[in-house]
Image (cartoon, rainbow, N blue to C red):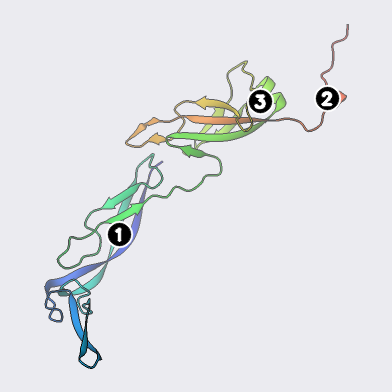
Amino acid sequence: NGKTAKLAVTRTVLKGEPKQCTTCRGRGVVVQMRQIGPGMVQQMQSRCPDCNGSCYSVKTAKERNVLEVVIDKGASHNTKLRFSGMGNESPNAETGDVVFVVQQKEHATFKRKGADLLVQRDIALVEALTGFEFVLEHLDGRRIVIKPPAGQIVRPETMSGVPHVMCVPDEGMPRKGNPFETGRLFVLVSIKFPEHYSRGDEPARARA
């Protein structure tokens, strides 16, 4: 269906012009000498504690922005939405981006395969022989009628775990970049056979 969400992001911004760090003299590192024995000196290099290795000294502040994230119809799992130049600012470096990653939750009724949707349905043996019909509430709120063509018999599984498949065209997900084109809806039909059978279940025979 698509969605527009407003999300708040807090980032670090620079205040004023960066100046060369006086502690490391713009090198980003400081060198310390440590005596480890008579006539023996060890030289140690570490990141500058004042500029954190950026070579510049500058005041920073926290800035809160509200970004409007537009999720298109048909967006897939792990779709990345990028806001250029909205990341943290740092001296002598290009400002980074803010990237939102769309995570698709599992649905109780539908499973998604690209632009196609899958629905599982159990029917009784008599429905497989005489036909069946049920109303399915779609993801956009529409109610569609699912039924096989007249006279079609739903056959049992030909292989273990492979149900009968019905295809309903144009009832899948909108395709990314072209929401007017949609995928297919597959209905996986499994026949539930009765656990017990008795003579009383036989149909009545016509009298001569």
Along the viewing direction, whichever of 153 and 26 lies nearer the viewer: 26
What numbered label is drawn on residue 93?
Answer: none
**Quadrant of the frame with the C terminus:** top right
Question: Residue 191: x, y in percent?
Answer: 67, 29
Residue at far bottom of view: 38
**Residue at 21% over, 65% down:** 89
**Residue at 13% over, 77% down:** 21
Does the CB distance between marks 1 and 2 fall below 8 Å? no
What numbered label is drawn on residue 66?
Answer: 1
N-terminal-most mark, 2 or 3:
3
Amino acid tagged 3: Pro
N-terminal-most mark, 1 or 3:
1
Image: 110 above or below 163: below
Question: Residue 40: x, y in percent?
Answer: 22, 88
Amino acid tagged 2: Asp
Question: Residue 45: x, y in percent?
Answer: 21, 78
**Alpha carbon distance from label 2 to label 3:** 20 Å
Q: Which residue is mark 2?
A: 201
Q: Which residue is mark 3?
A: 156
Image: 199 above or below 116: above
**Residue at 34% over, 58% down:** 7
